[in-house]
Amino acid sequence: MAARSVWVGSVNFGMVSIPTKLYSATDDDKINLHQYHEACGGRVKQPKWCEICSKFIDTTEIIKGYDAGDKLVELTEADLKSLPLKSIKSIEVLEFVDPSQIDFRCYSKAYFLKAETPGAKAYSLMMQGMEKTGLVAVARLTYREREHLCILRPYDGVMLLQNLFYHEQLRSHKEFRPTEFLITEKEAELAVTLVKAMHNPAFELFNYVDEYRNALGQLIEAKLAGKTLEVAETPREDVQEVADALLASINAVGAKA
């Protein structure tokens, strides 16, 4: 199935305008489970219920609005499209920064930016500029009724757009810091040894799969075939002392090597 764009507009880079389309860089391949009526197996759906009229209504009767307390402010699609924001129809490049300046917590969903034919040259030049400087573009984009802060960066011959969380959306990490403990030199050495033993310089993402999804698929297939899926539990040794647990882990890694 051909990829479908989620947004169409342009990237504004200084005085340069690059017509582009935005595509999701990831696929959601999870197995979808739904709700069914146990008595007959019928699919359970969520009807739209009006709390004032006390009746079910059709989607054609629904409007969008904001509850201002004593008044409902209706907002039409035309209203939303008329907002005085440049980022509604374009990706506005604000500045270029070193990617190391961006907090790891900020990164959200990723998209591919595809240039339309008239903008292909400018698109390539912008990518080359970022590749040669090692910088990424900070930009704004509005879609799905929200203005998103994002970055643009080169990625193997294409432009990658990654949404960023705003600063006010980031929670402080201080409350999650562990209580300070006395750590012995032996424990510290064992921790470093375990990290080094588990280090994989040849890491490849494709070696990892969603094991829950696979197990769920096997369970569904077994039930379709009228079989019972046997699950073997892996025994886990209960080690109380941290040093003993680290040493046991190091030995286990060595046995697998």
Image (cartoon, rainbow, N blue to C red):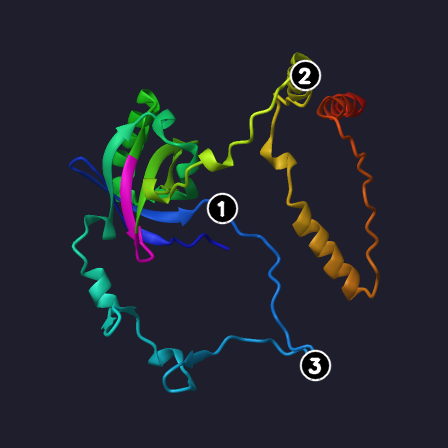
Query: Spatial distance from mark 2 to mark 3, Cα to Cα?
Result: 57 Å
The tag earlier along the polypeptide, 1 or 3, is: 1
Q: Which mark is residue 254?
A: none
The tag earlier along the polypeptide, 2 or 3, is: 3
Q: Which mark is residue 193?
A: 2
Residue receiving disc 3: 39
Residue at x 83% of width, y 47% of height? 232
Residues rendered magenta in the picture: 138-146
**Magenta-span inclusion, residue 41:** no
Left or right: 7 as drawn, with respect to 205? left
Residue at x 34% of width, y 36% of height? 152
Query: Can residue 89 be seen by looking at this rendering?
Result: no
Residue receiving disc 1: 26
Residue at x 77% of width, y 20% of height? 254
Left or right: 245 as drawn, with respect to 158? right
Q: Pinpoint residue 130: horizontal percent, then vertical percent.
A: 31, 27
Q: Nearer the viewer, residue 237 or 176?
A: 176
Query: Spatial distance from mark 1 to mark 3, Cα to Cα?
Result: 38 Å
The tag earlier along the polypeptide, 2 or 1, is: 1
Quarter of the image where one finds residue 192 = top right
Main secondary structure of the magenta stretch = strand
Query: Spatial distance from mark 2 to mark 1, Cα to Cα?
Result: 36 Å
